[in-house]
């Protein structure tokens, strides 16, 4: 749930009709597959019960406060506040957590970093929630995050090839042995910052912000939420199907795989209108979300030199889109990144030699000359350019002449241009974008293009909820102008080093349902099972093309994805535990590319898109000694490469309190395909210990 490119999903032939209704217009990703959690904190829409948590806070084992779930007003029957007056409706709670993680085998991280340090994570997180009930019709909620992570050798040892000091000035001095000016000090320019990107990556995870902040007003049958919100419309615990509203912050990627915590809150107007009973339809309501283009984000640790340089000057809109694709940085990779391609495909990649091994930048390449001193050794792998940028190298001199013999599909077209087209590869946008793809780079994207704040660029969605008999149904439509926050629209300005990276509109419609499984009461007493399902149809999804004739690198297809699940909730299992219950979840996820083509690519950007991509989740949890010992086993299986991700964990609570606990967990990634699905995280298995303390201040 592709990674570098992510899976883009959209909606079908009725798009023109919907555009007339809504005027204008999400994606799913492998990271989302790993995001196994549905905590309710701060969420203002109906959703399934607290579910799974791969890493970070374990909200479903926390003791409930008088205010109930975070973001909800104090529960009926709660004891009155000690102080009367205007502060009587204020409730402040939260938690502090400390997470430590150690790589199980740092030598397997050579695709990302030169560091062999075992430390994977040392994360300190403080979350504070304020619930304020002014009166029976007005309620306020706000959540703050304070996150600190220390400098990591993983980042500091980032591949110096991508350091600011090694920005290539121009390709004219390249040779067949060094097509990117390796070992050639004359083909190097010093960038104004003069600092390795690892320096910036060490601060990119620090986060001090107001995460959610909204006001709820009740007027008769109408509830209106206004502010920065998280709205979940999906049913799945592990896969984003109907969960289309909030983009995901994947800066922590696999190492930060808590779905609720990875959602980016969005500024919106969110009314919910309760409707009367309509014949056999009960519990009816309709909700609307309107997300303006104004989505400010201020995060100095990322904006001042890190990944956010791609949004420089657009902080008022940057909150509309995901900041990381898929990790905090690529080339050098930040922690928890995905694999880079190493197997070339004819017509899609540019390679410098017919004989491998091959390396697509990143830590797989050694560092070139970064000073006037001796140069780094010869690369261990021959250079390979991934498909989206390969046209520039296959056509433009001197790279076209350096392509491996018999490998350039444009060779018949280049007979009149020995050595390739004369391209202007020294252009710059002068936008102040500091990155390996910034100003003056060989592949210069500059500042990314986020749709504007005019009303026709806004996002809108509507959902209808009802209860028919024992079955709960919802139907939704979402008009999305930022392609779920993830862009794959990379276009080349022919004959130059300039590229554009933008977001495209898509439309989505879906249905969700859940109901108890029909069975005899004698069996249901011991097997309280519930069936869940959801389906989403998405129109005109953008895929990148491997066809060398497609100079704009674009293909389109409709996409259907669905999820089917069976839940076993708090089943009586005396054969297992006399002081707890048994909970289990089984989910099957299927992503279907309707107009699939072997000429489109997905995964990590260097493999063919799968027409049918299936994943299966199994989660089993129980407890002993009245929840003092709460073990959980979670696994996700993907048939592609027989990839298996396992997340066994146990939560240890002291018998005298539920205010604090210790969670121990292992994350194991196994499989035979490192370019698609969960296999892209191979090598990043690690062990986690997390201590969390929950508090009520007022």
Image: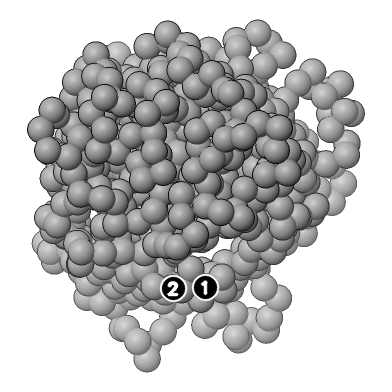
Q: Residue at x 51, y 76 (%)?
A: 642
Please tell me which residue lies in front, 55 or 132. Answer: 55
Disc 2 element: loop
How many numbered circles does the render carry? 2
Apparent side of residue 518 relative to residue 690 in the rendered image (left or right): right
Dots 2, 1 in contact, CB < 8 A: yes
- How many residues crowd around disc 1 within 10 Å: few (fewer than 14), some, or many (20 or more)? some
Q: Which residue is mark 1?
A: 641
> Where does the C terminus fall, quadrant-wise?
top left
Which mark identifies residue 350?
A: none
Q: Which residue is mark 2?
A: 671
Q: Residue at x 84, y 29 (%)?
A: 18
- How many residues crowd around disc 2 within 10 Å: few (fewer than 14), some, or many (20 or more)? many
In the rendered view, tell whether residue 506 sits above or below residue 620.
Answer: above
Measured from the top left, where is residue 64 in percent x and y?
A: 31, 49
In the rendered view, tell whether residue 589 sits above or below residue 49.
Answer: below
Which of the marked residues, 2 or 1, is nearer the chain's N terminus?
1
Please tell me which residue lies in front, 260 or 132. Answer: 260
């Amino acid at each position: 749930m592709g990674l570098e490119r992510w899976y883009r999903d959209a909606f079908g032939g009725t798009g023109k009709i919907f555009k007339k209704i809504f005027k204008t217009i999400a994606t799913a990703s492998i990271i989302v597959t790993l995001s196994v959690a549905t905590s309710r904190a701060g969420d203002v829409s109906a959703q399934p019960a607290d579910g799974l948590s791969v890493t970070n806070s374990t909200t479903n084992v926390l003791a409930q406060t008088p205010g109930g779930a975070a973001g909800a007003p104090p529960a009926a029957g709660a004891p009155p506040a000690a102080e009367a007056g205007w502060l009587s409706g204020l409730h402040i709670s939260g938690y502090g957590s400390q997470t430590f993680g150690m790589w199980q085998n740092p030598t397997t991280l050579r695709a990302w970093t030169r560091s062999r340090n075992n430390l994977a994570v040392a994360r300190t997180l403080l979350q504070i929630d304020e619930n304020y009930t002014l009166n029976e019709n007005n309620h306020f909620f706000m959540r703050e995050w304070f996150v600190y992570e220390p400098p990591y050798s993983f980042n500091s040892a980032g591949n110096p090839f991508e350091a600011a000091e090694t920005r290539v000035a121009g390709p004219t001095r390249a040779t067949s042995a060094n097509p990117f000016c390796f070992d050639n000090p004359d083909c190097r320019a010093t960038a104004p910052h003069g600092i390795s990107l690892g320096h910036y990556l060490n601060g990119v995870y620090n986060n001090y912000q107001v995460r959610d902040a909204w006001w709820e007003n009740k007027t008769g049958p109408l509830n209106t939420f206004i502010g920065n919100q998280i709205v979940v419309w999906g049913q799945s615990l592990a896969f984003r199907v109907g969960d289309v509203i909030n983009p995901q912050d994947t800066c922590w990627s696999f190492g930060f795989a808590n779905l609720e915590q990875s959602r980016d809150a969005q500024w919106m107007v969110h009314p919910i209108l309760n409707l009367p009973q309509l014949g056999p339809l009960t519990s009816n309501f309709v909700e609307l979300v309107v997300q303006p283009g104004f989505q400010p984000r201020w995060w100095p640790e990322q904006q001042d030199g890190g990944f956010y340089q791609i949004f420089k000057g657009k902080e008022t809109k940057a909150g509309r889109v995901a900041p990381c694709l898929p990790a905090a940085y690529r080339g050098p990779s930040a922690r928890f990144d995905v694999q880079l391609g190493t197997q070339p495909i004819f017509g899609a990649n540019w390679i410098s030699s017919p004989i491998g091994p091959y390396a697509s930048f990143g830590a797989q390449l050694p560092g070139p000359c970064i000073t006037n001193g001796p140069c780094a050794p010869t690369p261990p792998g021959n250079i390979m350019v991934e498909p989206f940028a390969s046209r520039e190298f296959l056509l433009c001199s001197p790279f076209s002449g350096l392509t491996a013999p018999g490998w350039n599909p444009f060779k018949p077209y280049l007979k009149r241009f020995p050595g390739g087209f004369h391209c202007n590869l020294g252009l710059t946008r002068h936008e102040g974008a500091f990155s390996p793809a910034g100003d003056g780079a060989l592949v210069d994207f500059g500042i990314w293009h986020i749709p504007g704040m005019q009303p026709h660029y806004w996002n809108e969605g509507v959902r209808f909820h009802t209860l028919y008999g024992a079955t709960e149904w919802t139907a939704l439509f979402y008009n999305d102008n930022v392609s779920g926050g993830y862009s794959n629209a990379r276009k080349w300005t022919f004959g130059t080093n300039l590229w554009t990276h933008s977001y495209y509109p898509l439309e989505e419609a879906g249905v969700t349902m859940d109901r108890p499984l029909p069975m005899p009461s004698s069996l249901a007493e011991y097997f309280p099972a519930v069936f869940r399902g959801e389906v989403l149809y998405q129109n005109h999804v953008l895929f990148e093309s491997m066809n060398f004739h497609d100079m704009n690198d674009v293909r389109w297809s409709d996409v259907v994805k669905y999820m089917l699940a069976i839940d076993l909730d708090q089943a009586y299992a005396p054969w297992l535990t006399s002081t707890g219950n048994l909970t289990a979840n089984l989910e099957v996820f299927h992503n279907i590319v309707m107009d699939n083509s072997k000429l489109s690519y997905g995964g990590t950007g260097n493999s063919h898109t799968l027409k049918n991509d299936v994943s299966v989740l199994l989660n089993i949890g129980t407890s002993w000694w009245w929840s003092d010992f709460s073990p959980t086993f979670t696994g996700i299986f993907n048939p592609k490469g027989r990839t298996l991700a396992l997340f066994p964990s146990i939560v240890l609570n002291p018998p005298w309190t539920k205010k604090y606990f210790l969670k121990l967990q292992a994350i194991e990634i196994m499989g035979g395909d490192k370019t698609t699905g969960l296999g892209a995280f191979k090598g990043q298995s690690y062990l986690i210990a997390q201590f969390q303390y929950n508090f009520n201040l007022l």
